[in-house]
Image: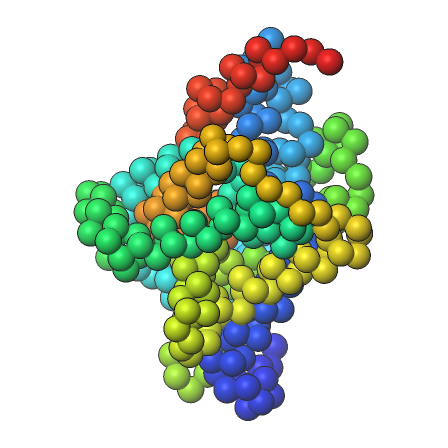
């Protein structure tokens, strides 16, 4: 991939932002059409294992199938590109800097609880906001503010304290190297995950269009890795190797619009995802204004969004950033954070939402 023309036309910061915009468009269209959502998958799983037939095969429903296909697709392409020497993620921040195990645990649990309270992760809120969901729009703004406060604001000392309790040392741990399986082993695990997803999707009669779009969400992950890796190789000034995440970029985009500064990949990513989701919803007639259902609902959504903002910065990424992007690179703390998100979401749903669902009269 030769990016010299793009660099000459827009400059290195502009090229990075343009790449972020393009990747965001792919993500936004695919995420809106596939209904990809970690919160929905965790709730489906939790209610399955706590249902009348616990741990039956039926707990792997359509939402988990979609999530697993996205997860597997991202892993396949990310590991394949490294296995065949097309890119090298060892210098990516997610792997090159020390990882926080304590941050991944605490942040993952916080994020999981928050996304159940807000009824969607940060990426899902961005997609929903683009379709006219005002609950998601306001919750997304609260998420971005909480993330910024945790990164550089009043909550940053607390974040740093928790993150420092237990770290990986000089750099994060690449599980493909630590386990001795290499990138080809990671590729095989990704193929197994994708194959399992397709099997469960077939059992749940998930449509072909949804499967294609779920794969599109997964494909956007290595697309971001490959673009930023190539840009870093071809730039005259140091450029970071980045993946898709919405914790730091949401905060950065908010600050960019408040106080414009030099553009980068993250500045293009968030507007790109918003625009992609908007266009997809507009073309399929799915734009619809929606608001809060009352004061209690509003408090719940906004508290959940704030939990996700802090949790995402602690965990090293959101449900997309740590849960799919970091996991596709086999970063240890990303896998820990993802586990924490599942646990936090299942427990929160079991304590707050499932009892109400069981008490509701059948129709």
Q: Is residue 10 left or right of residue 69?
A: left
In the rendered image, residue 337, in percent from the top left (x then y), is placed at 39, 41
Above or below: residue 241 compared with residue 152: below
In the rendered image, residue 173, in percent from the top left (x then y), is placed at 34, 50
- Residue found at x 63% / y 26%: 60
Above or below: residue 249 compared with residue 307: below
Total marks drawn? 0
In the rendered image, residue 38, in percent from the top left (x then y), is placed at 55, 39
Extreme bottom residue here? 8
Q: Is residue 343 left or right of residue 120?
A: left
Colouring scheme applied when the structure was drawn: rainbow
Q: Is residue 236 left or right of residue 50?
A: left
Quadrant in which the N terminus is drawn = bottom right
- Residue found at x 54% / y 79%: 15
- Residue found at x 38% / y 35%: 109
Quadrant in which the C terminus is drawn = top right
State whether residue 72 appears in this view: no
Of residues 252 and 74, the one nearer the viewer is 252
Above or below: residue 48 compared with residue 185: above
Extreme front residue here? 295
State whether residue 17 appears in this view: yes
In the rendered image, residue 221, in percent from the top left (x then y), is placed at 56, 57
Of residues 167 and 270, the one nearer the viewer is 270
- Residue found at x 80% / y 43%: 208
């Amino acid at each position: 991939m030769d990016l010299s023309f793009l660099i000459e036309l827009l400059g290195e910061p502009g090229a990075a932002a343009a790449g972020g915009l393009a990747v965001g468009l792919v993500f936004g269209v695919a995420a809106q059409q596939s209904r990809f959502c970690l919160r929905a998958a965790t709730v489906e799983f939790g209610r399955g294992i706590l249902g009348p037939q616990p741990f039956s095969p039926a707990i792997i429903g359509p939402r988990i199938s979609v999530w697993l296909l996205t997860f597997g697709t991202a892993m396949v392409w990310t590991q394949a590109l490294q296995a065949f020497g097309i890119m090298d993620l060892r210098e990516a921040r997610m792997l090159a800097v020390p990882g926080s195990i304590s941050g991944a645990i605490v942040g993952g649990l916080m994020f999981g609880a928050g996304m159940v309270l807000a009824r969607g992760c940060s990426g899902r809120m961005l997609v929903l906001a683009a379709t006219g969901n005002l609950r998601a729009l306001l919750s997304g703004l609260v998420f971005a503010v909480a993330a910024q406060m945790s990164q550089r604001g009043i909550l940053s000392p607390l974040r740093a304290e928790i993150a420092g309790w237990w770290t990986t040392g000089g750099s994060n741990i690449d599980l493909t190297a630590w386990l001795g399986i290499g990138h080809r082993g990671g590729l095989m695990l990704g193929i197994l995950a994708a194959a399992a997803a397709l099997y469960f999707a077939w059992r749940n009669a998930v449509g072909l269009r949804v499967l294609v779009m779920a794969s599109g969400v997964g494909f956007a992950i290595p697309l971001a890795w490959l673009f930023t890796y190539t840009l870093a190789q071809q730039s005259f000034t140091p450029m970071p190797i980045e993946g898709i995440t919405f914790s730091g970029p949401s905060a950065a985009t908010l600050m960019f619009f408040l106080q414009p500064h030099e553009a980068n990949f993250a500045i293009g990513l968030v507007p790109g995802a918003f625009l992609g989701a908007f266009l997809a919803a507009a073309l399929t007639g799915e734009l619809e204004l929606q608001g809060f259902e009352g004061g209690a609902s509003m408090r719940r959504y906004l508290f959940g969004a704030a939990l996700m903002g802090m949790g995402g910065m602690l965990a090293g990424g959101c449900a997309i950033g740590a849960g799919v992007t970091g996991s596709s690179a086999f970063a240890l703390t990303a896998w820990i954070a993802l586990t924490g998100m599942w646990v936090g979401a299942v427990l929160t749903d079991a304590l707050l939402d499932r009892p109400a669902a069981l008490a509701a009269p059948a129709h």
